[in-house]
Image (tube, rainbow, N blue to C red):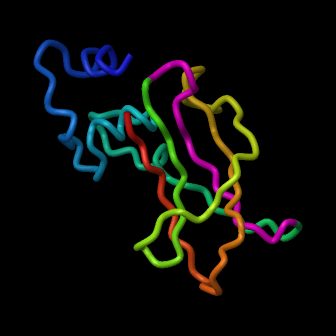
Amino acid sequence: AKEAWLFRHFGESPPAWSSDGDNDGADLNHEYAFGCNPHRPDYESMQLALKYNTSSKLLEVTYTRRKSGTHQLNYQLEVSDNLNTWNLPTNELSSIPHPSLGCAFEQVLAEVSESQTSASQKFIRIKVEE
């Protein structure tokens, strides 16, 4: 699926997966993983939506990923109090079909479990690996 996506967008002479031809800060691996167009800057598919749930008193994170079974990627929501240690616990609550990217993508809702530290700030990232 990944090689077919690259061929569909670039034909017989594709650039390296590490390239960023549209200069939006995402290499082709991330463009593929989050459903972006590698020919135009489109940050919206890579953005995380954050919301503090006043009932559970936990931070909720919504992000886009390819549906399981359509790729060889592993998505990991990572949270840190300090940018050095990325292992605070998260819990996936739900996933629904993505409203605009088609049937190969879904929106995931996860919550960030309470940290064992008293830090008031949190750093969040999505790690995507093969």
Q: Which residues are magenta?
A: 56-71
Q: Looking at the figure, which quarter contains the C terminus?
A: top left
User: Image point 57% across, 80% down: which residue?
Assistant: 121
45 horizontally vs 15: left or right:
right
Q: Nearer the viewer, residue 71 or 53?
A: 71
Q: Name above or below for residue 106 compared with residue 113.
A: above
Horizontal and vertical percent for residue 37?
A: 36, 33
User: Image point 30% across, 47% down: which residue?
Assistant: 26
Q: Name above or below for residue 55 compared with residue 8.
A: below
10 horizontally vs 40: left or right:
left
Which of the 4 image quarters holds residue 11?
top left
Q: Name above or below for residue 10 compared with residue 91.
A: above
**Residue at the extreme left of the image, as rendered:** 13
Q: Nearer the viewer, residue 23 or 123?
A: 123
110 horizontally vs 73: left or right:
right
Q: Looking at the figure, which quarter contains the N terminus?
A: top left
Q: Is residue 66 magenta?
A: yes
Horizontal and vertical percent for residue 110?
A: 68, 51
User: Image point 21% across, 43% down: which residue?
Assistant: 20
Which of the 4 image quarters holds residue 54?
bottom right
Horizontal and vertical percent for residue 24?
A: 29, 50
User: Image point 71% across, 71% down: which residue?
Assistant: 114
Horizontal and vertical percent for residue 35?
A: 45, 33
Across the whole image, how many numbered discs are drawn on residues? 0
